[in-house]
């Protein structure tokens, strides 16, 4: 068990009422957002890190010798995640190799600045960094997508593309495990959203700490599943971590925004409601569906284009692959390629419309000239 060091200023004795409720020796500096316990800074670091360590160990997230990619955006969650994982890996000897993996969606004024933060983190934490861009993978940036398809569905496009980009980035690095900074608030929001939408299928998976698409060799895990957003911010603040705090210029999904607002109001009345919602989500049991499961693969190979080869017994079979890009897909064409097709069609239409409108403007100009002279 890790114990925080003693206070160097031990001559200054705080009043009993001000003492930390954990160590009873240092002055309480904060009310812990999770349970309103009055604690000192060092005890906060200790409980915050220990809870994450317990989540990792209880759920057997890592295996010795494993290489893991931390989805790094430069924001507070992923910055704290990279910092804490490096620290816990050294403290508890997990024996994992950590790599930062960033996605450049191509959002000027947001992602370019946040990537500059990740590049600084790379130096500060001495971790390798790989950046994969939408431009290279899809030949579109998010700014171009929004200009073409409007802002309303920006997060839908972005979410589908990012998921695939992370898998492809991990494939490039030869890594089968991507760790993300999704926290307890994100998870509780997702549970609430799925309940409010009656989306039973998604509700089933929304509290899983490890997720893996069927047949996919890339697993994803969330070590911050039980960490409150407010505590992540406090940790980053007290540890003086270098992170980027500007929100994306494209508003998050309207419905998620509403669920977030609802969560914040509930949390203000009862802080434990975030964990309670997650526990409720975990307790939902759906009637088991009768699905024929493919036997587990003995060996999985990820190619750099995102496609996979699964070894079953002595034979090698390809996982279902998109006919266009070769990426793993349960349909003939993957979701990203379907979205790209729609975008290409709208781009072509915009160009035709522009040509027509230029023709129209030229015609109007000629008519006006005739009328004037
Ligand atoms: S807010 Fe939406 S558009 Fe912006 S980075 Fe997030 S998912 Fe992408
Ligand atoms: Zn203390
Ligand atoms: Zn595809």
Image: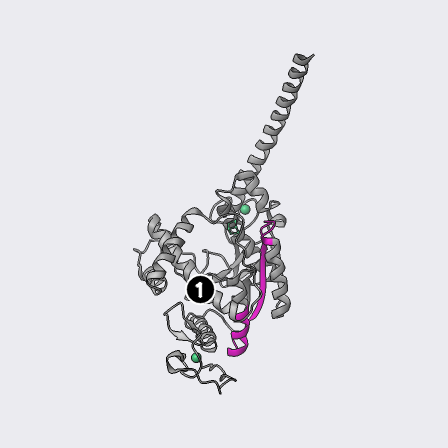
Name the one closer to the observer, 203 or 176: 203
Residue 26 picture location, percent across and down: 44, 81
Instruction: Tell me the residue at 49%/48% (across/down).
Output: 251
Element type where label 1 sits in the image: helix
Q: How is the image coloured?
A: one colour
Residue 129 picture location, percent across and down: 62, 63
In the image, is residue 109 part of the stretch drawn in magenta?
yes
Q: Which residue carries the number 1 mark?
A: 230
**Taking 138 as reference, is 354 above or below it?**
above
Residue 246 picture location, percent across and down: 54, 55
* Residue extent of the magenta highlight: 83-111
Instruction: Tell me the residue at 43%/56% (across/down).
Output: 294
Q: Quadrant of the N terminus?
A: bottom left
Neighbourhood count class around disc 1 (C-alpha, 10 Å): few under 14, some 14–19, many 20 upward: few
Q: Quadrant of residue 244?
A: bottom right
Instruction: Tell me the residue at 60%/65% (across/down).
Output: 121
**Taking 238 as reference, is 359 above or below it?**
above
Name the one closer to the observer, 88 or 114: 114
Instruction: Tell me the residue at 54%/74% (across/down).
Output: 87
Observer able to see residue 336? yes
Name the one closer to the observer, 34 or 14: 14
């Amino acid at each position: 068990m890790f114990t925080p060091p003693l206070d160097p200023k031990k001559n200054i004795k705080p009043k009993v009422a001000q003492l930390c409720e954990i160590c009873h020796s240092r002055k309480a500096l904060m009310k812990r957002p999770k349970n309103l316990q009055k604690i000192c800074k060092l005890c906060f670091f200790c409980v915050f890190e220990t809870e994450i360590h317990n989540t990792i160990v209880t759920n057997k997230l890592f295996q010795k010798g494993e290489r893991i990619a931390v989805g790094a955006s430069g924001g507070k969650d992923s910055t704290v995640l990279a910092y804490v994982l490096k620290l816990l890996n050294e403290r508890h000897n997990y024996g994992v190799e950590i790599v930062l993996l960033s996605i450049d969606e191509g959002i000027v004024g947001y992602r370019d600045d946040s990537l500059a933060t990740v590049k600084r983190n790379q130096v500060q934490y001495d971790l390798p960094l790989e950046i994969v861009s939408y431009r290279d993978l899809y030949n579109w940036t998010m700014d171009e997508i929004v200009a073409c398809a409007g802002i309303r569905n920006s997060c839908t496009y972005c979410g589908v593309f990012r998921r695939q980009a992370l898998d492809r980035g991990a494939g490039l690095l030869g890594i089968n495990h991507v760790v993300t900074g999704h926290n307890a608030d994100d998870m509780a929001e997702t549970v609430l959203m799925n309940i409010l939408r009656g989306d039973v299928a998604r509700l089933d998976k929304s509290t899983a700490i490890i997720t893996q698409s069927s047949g996919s060799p890339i697993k994803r895990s969330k070590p911050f599943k039980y960490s409150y957003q407010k505590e992540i911010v406090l940790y980053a603040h007290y540890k003086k971590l270098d992170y980027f705090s500007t929100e994306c210029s494209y508003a998050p999904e309207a419905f998620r925004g509403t669920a977030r607002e609802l969560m914040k109001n509930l949390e203000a009345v009862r802080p434990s409601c975030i964990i309670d919602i997650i526990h409720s989500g975990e307790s939902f049991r759906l009637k088991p569906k009768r699905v024929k499961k493919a036997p587990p693969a003995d060996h999985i190979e990820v190619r750099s284009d995102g496609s996979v080869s699964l070894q079953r017994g002595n034979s090698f079979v390809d996982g279902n692959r998109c006919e266009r890009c070769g990426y793993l897909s349960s349909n003939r064409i993957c979701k990203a390629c379907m979205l790209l097709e729609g975008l290409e069609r709208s781009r072509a239409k915009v160009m035709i419309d522009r040509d027509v409108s230029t023709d129209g403007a030229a015609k109007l100009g000629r008519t006006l000239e005739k009328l004037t002279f």
